[in-house]
Image: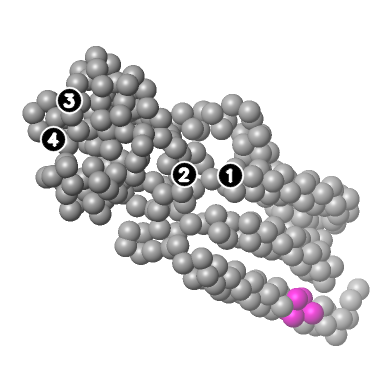
Amino acid sequence: MLSSKEELEGGLRLGAVRRVKRLLYITQVLVLILAIFVVILAEGRASLNPFYLPINSFLYFVLLMMLIISVEAMVFMVLEMRLLKSNSTKYYMAKRSARRSIIIIIVAVVIALLFLTPYFGNALEDGLAMRGTLTNTHTVAASSNVTFYDRDNFGLRQVTKVTVTSTGGEARVYLVSEQYMNLHHDNVSQLIQYRINTYAYVVNRTMEYNTGELQAGKYFLVLDTLRSDASSVSFQVTSTMSSTFLSFVPLFAILFAVVNIGWIIYLIPSTRKYSKGAIYK
C-alpha cells in the first residue's frame, strides 16, 4: 500500500504535469495565431472588404502545429498515466484515447485516398466549373454578361481559364474587372479599351483565354451584342483547387494516420495491463 505522503506526491506531480500541458497548449495556440497574422501582414494580400483570407499562406504551419500538438498530447498522457494510482482510470483513459485514434485514422485514410485518387482532381475541377449562355439580343450593346469571382474568400479555388463557344456566326466577348464595368457599363466602346483579354476576344466557334494571376475580385464576361453575329454564345469558367491545398492535406492526413496507428500499437499492452486491475471495463 502507498503511504499518504506518496499519494500526495503523486497528486502534486500530476497537477504539475497538467499545468505544464495547459500552459504549453495556450502558448502554442498564441504562437500559431501570431504567426498567421505575421504571414498575412507580410504578404499583404488579405482584405476585409471584400473579405479575402488566403489560407494557403499558413496552411502548412497550421497542419504542422496540429500534428505536433497531437504528439504532445500522447506524451502528456503517458506521463499522467504513470502518476495516476487507479488502474481503472488508466484503463479508461487508454481505451478512450484508442477509440479517438481509430476515428482519426479512419478520417485521415479516407481523406488521403480521396485526394490521391487520379480522378478526384478532374471531378473536382468539373464540379467547380461555371457554365451558361450569353444571350445575343442584337439590340443593346453589352446587354448580356455574366459575373464571377476570380477566387473564393479563402484562396482555395482560383479561375484558370475562360472558354467561349459561338454558333451561327462570330461573337465578341470581353473580360473586364468590376472597376471598369461600373464606370463604363453603359458605354461598350469605352469598356472595350479596358478588356483583360486584349487579343483573345473574337470568338469564331471557340475561344480560350488563360486568366493567369488575376487580382482577387469580381469580374464580368461581357457579350458585345452590337458587334456579334452568333445566334448562340455559351461559356465555361474553369477553376482549380490550390496546389498547396491538394498537396499538403493528403500528406498530413497520412502523417496523422501513421502517428495514431503507432499510438494504438503502444496502448495495446498498457490497456491489457490496466484492464486486469480495473473495476469497470
Residues at marks 2 and 1, CA–CA distance in whole angstroms: 14 Å
Please identify the quarter of the rendering in which residue 159 is found: top left
Left or right of 258 in this view: 234:
left
The residue under the point 26% across, 21% down is: 170
Please identify the quarter of the rendering in which residue 76 is found: bottom right
Residues at marks 3 and 1, CA–CA distance in whole angstroms: 37 Å
In this picture, is 27 found above or below 217?
Answer: below
Which residue type does callout 3 highlight? Answer: Asn
In the image, farthest residue toward the bottom: 5
Left or right of 171 in this view: 51:
right
Disc on the earlier residue, 2 or 1: 2
Residue 200 disc label: none
Which residue type does callout 2 highlight? Answer: Gly
Q: Which residues are magenta?
A: 13-17
Residues at marks 3 and 2, CA–CA distance in whole angstroms: 28 Å
User: Where is residue 263 shown, x and y percent of the image?
Assistant: 80, 52
* 264 drawn magenta: no
Residue for badge 4: 141
- Whether pointer 2 and pointer 1 mark residues with C-beta atoms closer than 8 Å, the reply is no
User: Where is residue 219 shown, x and y percent of the image?
Assistant: 30, 45
Residue for badge 2: 212
Disc on the earlier residue, 4 or 3: 3
Label the magenta part by its dominant secondary structure.
helix
User: Where is residue 201 shown, x and y percent of the image?
Assistant: 32, 33
SS at badge 2: loop
Residue for badge 3: 136
Q: Nearer the viewer, mark 3 or mark 1?
A: 3
* Residue 189 in sight from this viewpoint: yes
Which residue type does callout 1 highlight? Answer: Ser
